[in-house]
Image: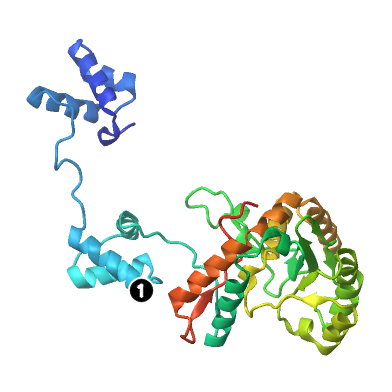
């Protein structure tokens, strides 16, 4: 049954109207599906002061004071990794007030603080930060026409168990340990594949599945550069720019020699900057598409087939949108550098793998 404290004023007046018309408290409560106690208390209040408005001070007394709420918010901001249980203990030690975890959550929510997953970070030296900043400054005003000459590439691994960060389940409260709500995971890992892909404005490469689980400089040259990148260079002409990150296989001597022999120009790429590479969004998009398949792929061959098909089905508008987001990515990276001190060393610099403003 509904509680008095949640009744709308219009419902309260309907209750009063029925009682004034001669209906009993029990009959009114039954007709409106409201507890008899609520109807009785409301009728007594109306008889005493002619009002149905909740009086100040009614209801359960607030457990924490305003100063204690401020203390909680200040403590949470000073130690952002503190759990609600830890904050409750600190509050009890400081003020003697014992509050539940739920109360802690509510008080922090009132102060605009919410429990969220932290952004992913990578550790950068001062020089690497400076390199990122300079790259963003140089490229933030590039036009779409300039970016249209760049082939953005990357590798990614997909496994049969999926990515737990992409998987959520719907369940009832208190059923966490039900077998139907448990996702099994092999502690030693499961089968998977390593793939490579490239994207451009109004174009993309086929998705390539590597023949082995790891990538060396020779495999990179023979399975990626020769059959894919070389052909794109020939199709786009001398303005073509090739983007790959600074992974060790990408910078092998035989790779550099091959690119030079084929007159393939690289666009310089700042270190530790997956957040600037738009293809990262596509890996996430692809992973979510695979996670939606029912039943899911049961073996590596089925996973390969699904990846190739879902890559082919990604709308080109999605590809174009993530590449068009590069100005936003550069702006975010520059702000991160300023916020964390361009000349400071040892700070963690945010490496977002998705730009919120990009719709995919």
| Residue toward you, 145 or 14 | 145
User: Measuring 90% from the left and 82% from the top, which residue is drawn there?
Assistant: 261
In which image quadrant can residue 58 be found?
top left
User: What is the count of numbered marks?
Assistant: 1
User: Up-down: is 212 above or below 332?
Assistant: below
Which of the pair 213/19 is nearer the observer?
A: 213
Q: Is residue 21 left or right of residue 240?
A: left
Residue 66 placement, left or right of 270: left
Up the image or down, 350 lies above or below 39; here it is below
Report whether residue 15 is seen: yes
Q: Quadrant of residue 130?
A: bottom right
Measured as percent of width and height from the top left, residue 176 is found at 53, 56
Instruction: Please name the residue shown 37% across and 71% down the image.
Output: 82
Picture coordinates of residue 319, whole percent (x, y): 72, 56
Helix, strand or loop at label 1? It is loop
Give the residue number, with chain letter if any, for mark 1.
79
Q: Report crowding for label 1: few under 14, some 14 to 19, many 20 or more residues within 10 A (C-alpha).
A: few
Specify the quadrant of the image occupied by residue 27.
top left
Residue at the bottom extreme of this rendering: 253
Is 201 on the left or on the right of 308, as rendered? left
Residue most extreme to the top = 21
Q: Nearer the viewer, residue 291 or 197?
A: 197
- Where is residue 336? Give x, y as percent: 49, 72
Residue at 79%, 57% in the rendered image: 297
């Amino acid at each position: 049954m509904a509680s008095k404290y949640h009744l709308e004023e219009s419902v309260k007046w309907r209750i009063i109207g029925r009682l004034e018309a001669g209906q009993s408290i029990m009959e009114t409560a039954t007709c409106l599906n409201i507890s008899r106690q609520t109807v009785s208390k409301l009728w007594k209040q109306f008889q005493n002061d002619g009002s149905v408005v909740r009086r100040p001070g009614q209801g359960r007394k607030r457990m924490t004071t305003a100063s204690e709420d401020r203390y909680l918010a200040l403590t949470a901001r000073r130690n952002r990794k503190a759990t609600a249980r830890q904050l409750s203990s600190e509050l009890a030690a400081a003020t003697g007030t014992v509050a539940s975890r739920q109360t802690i959550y509510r008080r922090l929510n009132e102060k605009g603080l919410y429990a969220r997953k932290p952004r992913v970070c990578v550790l950068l030296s001062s020089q690497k930060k400076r390199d990122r900043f300079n790259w963003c400054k140089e490229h933030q005003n590039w036009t779409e026409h300039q970016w249209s000459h760049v082939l953005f590439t990357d590798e990614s691994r997909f496994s049969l168990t999926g990515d737990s960060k992409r998987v959520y389940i719907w369940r009832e409260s208190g059923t966490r340990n039900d077998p139907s709500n448990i996702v099994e995971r092999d502690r030693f890992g499961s089968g998977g594949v390593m793939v490579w892909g490239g994207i451009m404005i109004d174009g993309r490469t086929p998705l390539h599945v590597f023949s082995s689980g790891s990538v060396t400089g020779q495999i990179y040259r023979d399975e990626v550069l020769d059959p894919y990148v070389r052909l794109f260079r020939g199709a786009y002409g001398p303005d073509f720019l090739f983007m790959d990150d600074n992974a060790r296989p990408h910078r092998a001597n035989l790779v550099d020699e091959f690119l030079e022999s084929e007159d393939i120009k690289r666009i310089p790429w700042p270190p530790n900057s997956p957040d600037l590479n738009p293809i990262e969004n596509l890996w996430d998009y692809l992973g979510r598409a695979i996670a939606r398949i029912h039943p899911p792929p049961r073996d590596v061959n089925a996973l390969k087939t699904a990846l190739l098909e879902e890559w082919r089905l990604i709308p080109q508008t999605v590809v174009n949108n993530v590449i068009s987001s590069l100005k936003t990515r550069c702006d975010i990276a520059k702000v991160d550098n300023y916020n964390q001190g361009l000349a400071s060393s040892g700070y963690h610099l945010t490496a977002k793998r998705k730009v919120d403003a990009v719709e995919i």
